[in-house]
Amino acid sequence: MWQQPTSLFTDHYELTMLQASLHSGAAHRPSVFEAFARRLPEGRRYGVLAGTGRILEGLKEFRFGEEQLRFLSDTKVVDATTIKYLENFSFSGNIYGYAEGEIYFPYSPVMIVESTFAEACVLETFVLSALNHDSAIASAASRMIAAAGTRPCIEMGSRRTHEESAVAAARAAIIAGFDSTSNLEGGHRYGLKTVGTAAHSFTLLHDSERAAFQAQVDSMGVGTALLVDTYDVEQGVRTAVEVAGSELGAVRLDSGDLVEQARWVRTLLDDLGNENTRIMVTSDLDEYAIASLQSAPVDSYGVGTSLVTGSGHPTASMVYKLVSRHNDAGEFVDVAKAAKNKVSVGGRKYAVRQLDERGRATEELIGIGEIPETDANDRLLLEQFVVNGEINTDFTAASGVRRAVKRHRDSIKEMPGTSRRLQRGEPVIPTRFINED
């Protein structure tokens, strides 16, 4: 959870817009903002939403205390009028969106903020920071899980990203189907399952590989996983079996031709009487490397760098746009950006996933201004997370992660069978707007 106010996790221009709108008198106009992605990353056929729970947790702490106000005043980011407004800032509007773990597509309204312009404006950067990072990780993780099939994946990329990003990445990976993480802070905050044994340095610390293995087994039991490629892999496997016996939990391979190596290590383990000893592989894996290991006798995958950097797509490219606001007459009017290649669609959105008689998704229907007509088996996609400033805590903390894991699992089941293949193509289902002008 957040340990400090989150209000300055924002861009300077959000507050200059606030100041200018306070001076023009438009700051308090009721407004609707929407977060969405215009397109999926190249080669991707669906995205996975993550970060919503972290946004809600951060919203609890989105306030401007004396320290934050002093900074804004001393550095002349905003004027005295704006400082006065921020002194009592507390979000009092409504937030809707797709449930965390949900599949999304181009123009899916994954988060909708209804409030005054002022309140929604200052949230923009914070919302996009969480959604873009976490959704990029979850989307990559989902593809890796698809490639892994029934074999579990372990998130172990903490050393390849910022310390807070590592916690968010661990959370997002679990939401998308990873079995566990190496990140202890993620385990502490969100109840994530954590795992870990030893690195090459532990073997190098001891006078021999045998001594290192013996120390680990004595400390952690024979069910531990021993890293066998610090020196010679074959000798490492033989030594591991000699030390731990037939109940050795696993051996880990972290270098070389993993497909070929896994095959002969499996044969060697079986010949030594260790048919139940598992083989875990690591070493810069991504979804394509995992797919290439499908035919190899591998039991689990440890994934680091590629996962926490979105496997080539470190952002989900989501944007946050004003889509409706009051005019001078006090009536809502739809507004939209029309710039080339950056078009947005005006109006408050309502989203429905259309399902066939087998419960498989066929289309994403987006109603403008009203909920699209639905069949009995169709599914409404928008949840309400904040009601007049009150946060629904069901979507936060460890329980929120568990809810998101289930949502992702159920959403994937709805997708057409081709959705989990790694081939390039169009989004697995189309998005269609209803009542668009």
Image (cartoon, rainbow, N blue to C red):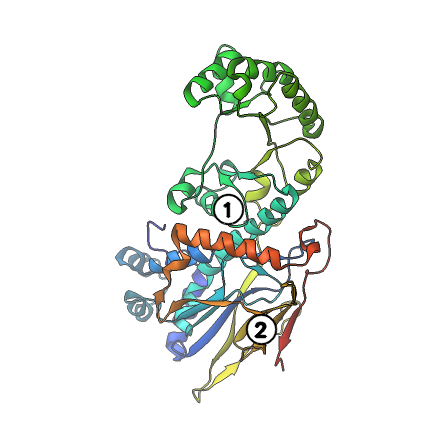
Image spot of residue 434 (x, y percent):
62, 78
Residue 10 picture quarter: bottom left
Image spot of residue 132 (x, y percent):
53, 55
Residue appearing at x 67%, y 64% in the figure: 429
Choose between 174 and 389: the one closer to the eye: 174
User: Where is 289 relative to 20, above or below?
Assistant: above
Asked if labels 1 and 2 touch by Cβ distance under 8 angstroms, the answer is: no
Residue appearing at x 50%, y 57% in the figure: 131
Secondary structure beneath dot 2 equals loop
Image spot of residue 149 (x, y percent):
64, 43
Choose between 268 and 26: the one closer to the eye: 268
Q: Which residue is mark 1?
A: 174
User: Where is 187 relative to 56, above or below?
Assistant: above
Outermost residue on the bottom side: it is: 329
Q: Which residue is mark 2?
A: 376
Choose between 226 and 388: the one closer to the eye: 226
